[in-house]
Amino acid sequence: MSYRTIIILDGDMEDEWSNDTELGRKIAAGAKNIGGVESNLAYGHVVASAAAHLPTVIALNGTSAAPVVDEAALRSLAKTMGFNVSRISLKENMGWTSSSNIAN
């Protein structure tokens, strides 16, 4: 199974992180301890690490970021951006467009 790791690096500190020979090790340690001390880099942080087949929504604000982990958080984020979130019906989600596609 593949994993993906999402990180935020401060672009204003590019000279520092681009020359950090330990950056890969620091990211790996942070990915194993999201929210812990290891996930905070001197010039950014590890935001999330998850199985690659799972969708992840990340909210970015300045140089900070956090995963949107539940429906309430998604609705709140959408509202701050002027959008509403609504569930689609199972019929729409499965691609059924007419009653002929639905088994009786």
Image (spheres, grey):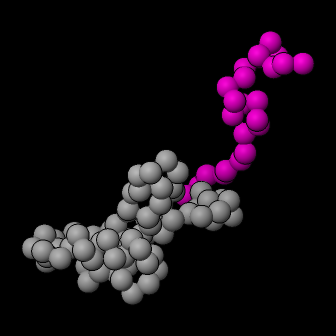
Residue 88 appears at what percent x and percent y? 72, 39
Quadrant for the C terminus, please. top right
The answer to whether one can see residue 56 in this image is yes
The answer to whether one can see residue 10 in this image is no
Magenta stretch contains residue 74: no
Residue 97 appears at what percent x and percent y? 72, 20
Q: Residue furthest right?
A: 104
Q: Is 5 drawn above or below residue 64 in the view shown?
A: above
Q: Residue at 48%, 69% (x, y): give it.
A: 66
Q: Is 40 drawn above or below residue 24 in the view shown?
A: below
Q: What segment carries the magenta color?
A: 81-104
Instruction: Give 49 or 42, whichever is nearer the viewer.
Output: 49
Residue 92 appears at what percent x and percent y? 71, 30
Q: Residue at 45%, 76% (x, y): give it.
A: 34
Q: Residue at 34%, 76% (x, y): give it.
A: 29
Magenta stretch contains residue 92: yes
